[in-house]
Image (spheres, rainbow, N blue to C red):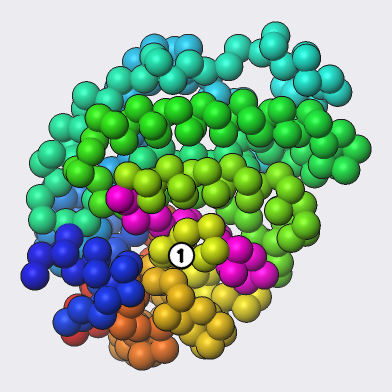
Amino acid sequence: MTSRELLKDIIALKPGPRCGLWLGNPHPDSWPGLHRYFGTRTEEDFRHKLGDDYRWISPSFIESTFHDPSCRRLFDLGKSKTSHGQAGPLAGIEDPAGLDAFDWPDPRALDFKDAIEVLKNAGPYYRASGFWSPFFHDIMDLFGMEDYFVKMRTNPAVVQAVTDRVCGFYHEANERFFEAAGNLVDGFFFGNDFGTQRDLMISPALFDEFVLPWFKRFTEQALGRGYQVILHSCGSIHRVIPRLIEAGVDCLHPLQAKAANMDAATLSRDFKGKIAFLGGLDTQGVLNQGSPGEVKAEVRRIKDVLGPCLIVSPSHEAILPDVPPRNVAAMAEAALE
């Protein structure tokens, strides 16, 4: 059984001979130390050596996708800001008609040639792809976090109009990409962090009004193509996981282990058998501070609690430089047992 076949089954809630493994997406500052420790030269060398089953190949992160500057502007909005909370270019907009003056990106200018080539050469591994589509955060940057959340109450029409513009771009971009990629893609992997360490950023009622309608359209778009749906959301999102399952999400990532009600035991009790799990290995205390033996013990524990339909991975995919490479090795070894 190939890694691709194994993970397809796991995400479809069909237990395989073992749990899966994704090493995550190490921070750029982490790569020099990882390569020195493992004696690797490229990312693919590293993943192959440690037995990684999962390849994340998104056109969002391939520079040539945006060869025309007109479709890059939406993605560049946050670069001049220091936080999501800082007021954005639409903070003063109170009439949806005013949005016409903004230079919205054009999906017709996207180029998928290089992304398709990477997918073709991905090997016998699971291919998670599609535009990252972080619409919740893009809208947060366009308004500024406070303005965004306040306007949900004071001016829902303008929030909805901006949501339609941002999500409309991603939906059409994905439609064009999926048409070009076809069966080279196994799962649509997209991300919006809806939670904090303690709870959701907005109430379930506001989530239902401003997030869920387009969220459903994204999942339906992918499912209609025969793709599995993998959602990334950091933080405590326990209260809306039933909605996500109902909307068609097959697999939940990254299971932020120290966030409220996102521990393995609670997720297993409430959702095991209803959704597959990707992640769960604590990066706030275990992977970064534990011994290799402690890391292995924690991996075995979460496999027992969340498995067998589990892909072991860090509870934050961007492995930071404070994670010792020996602990990355321990995670991989225990995951593949």
For this view, does 196 lie left or right of residue 154?
A: left
Q: Characterize the local packing of mark 1: few (<14), some (14-19) or many (20 or more) Cα atoms within 10 angstroms.
A: many
Which residue is at 70% across, 61% downward? 200
What is the x, y in percent for residue 63?
Answer: 33, 26
* Front in this rendered view, residue 116 or 245: 245
Q: Position of residue 222 (x, y in %)?
A: 39, 46
Picture quadrant of residue 4: bottom left
Q: Residue at x 20, y 79 (%)?
A: 16
Q: Is residue 143 above or below residue 310?
A: above
Type of amino acid at the residue the image marks with label 1: Leu
Residue 88 appears in view = no
Q: Find the residue positioned furthest to the top.
A: 101
Any magenta on residue 267? no
Residue 174 in the image: state x and y as whole percent: 40, 34
Q: Which residue is pictured at 36% across the width and 40% down the height?
A: 130
On the picture, is 169 further left or further right than 327?
right
Pointer 1 residue: 252
> Considering only vertical position in the picture, is 7 above or below 46?
below
Q: In the image, residue 96 lies at what x, y percent?
A: 78, 20
Point out the image quarter for the C terminus: bottom left
Q: Tell me the SS state at disc 1.
A: strand
Queried whether the magenta region covers residue 233, the answer comes back as: yes
Q: Quadrant of residue 238?
A: bottom right
Q: Residue at x 17, y 82 (%)?
A: 17
For residue 252, say whether it is visible: yes
In the depicted structure, whether residue 121 falls above or below residue 48: above
Query: Which of the 4 image quadrants contains residue 300?
Result: bottom left
Front residue of 56/16: it is 16
Q: Which range of residues does the magenta coloring cover?
A: 226-244
